[in-house]
Amino acid sequence: MHKHLVWAALLCSTALVSIPALAESASTKGVAASASAHDINIHSDNLMNSKGSTIAAPQSKGGMSARGLNGTCNIHVNNSTGYYVTFYFNGSAAGAVGPWGDLYPTSTEGSAVLYAKAVFTDGTVLTFGPQNFSCTGTDFTWTLTP
């Protein structure tokens, strides 16, 4: 009987390893620029909220599922740099992530543009993207590298 349990465990672990992951990923290397230059990828650097203007809750937080989509997408922003980085979703500031940190925003939109920027005291910036993103119900990892 013990031999059957060992074989069952081996078969189950083999099956789990062979299941393809349902996540997508991209890696973006930073591009150095001047901080004074106009950045066409940023529409709003403001993280303030407007009364009466909210983003709909994703299905995982009690919201309705989006028609035509397979649900929401979890985005993993993997900051593989030693810098503080501001994250932009469709040109609007959507969060910040510290050195070597992670940010986990959720998207319900079909298509979006991801962008990130590290600002330095010497007047330069390191930009990441723009990275096109399409929510199809699978998770997405975006890795930022220096």
Image (spheres, rainbow, N blue to C red):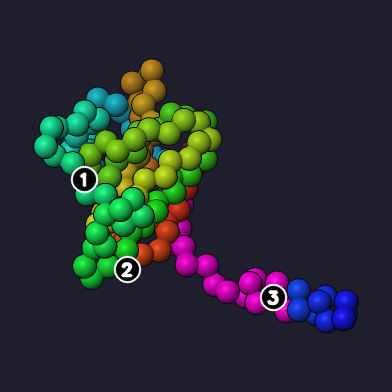
Q: Are marks 3 and 2 in contact (CB under 8 Å)?
A: no
The local crowd at label 1, few if under 14, some if 14 to 19, many if 20 or more residues have their Cα within 10 Å, is few
Asked whether 93 falls inside the magenta stretch, the response is no
- Give the mark nearer the N terminus: 3 vs 2: 3
Q: Provide the residue designation for mark 1.
A: 55
Q: Quadrant of the N terminus?
A: bottom right
Nearer to the camera, 29 or 63: 63
Q: Provide the residue designation for mark 2.
A: 70
Mark 3 and mark 2: Cα distance apart in space: 28 Å
- Give the mark nearer the N terminus: 1 vs 2: 1
Q: Quadrant of residue 33?
A: top left
Disc 3 residue type? Answer: Cys
Task: Look at 32% across and 44% down and name the residue there.
Answer: 115
Mark 1 and mark 2: Cα distance apart in space: 18 Å
Mark 3 and mark 1: Cα distance apart in space: 41 Å
Task: Look at 81% across and 77% down and name the residue there.
Answer: 5
* 96 relative to 47 in the view: left or right: right
* Magenta region: 10-28
Disc 1 residue type? Answer: Ile
Task: Look at 27% across and 45% down and name the residue there.
Answer: 89
Disc 2 residue type? Answer: Asn
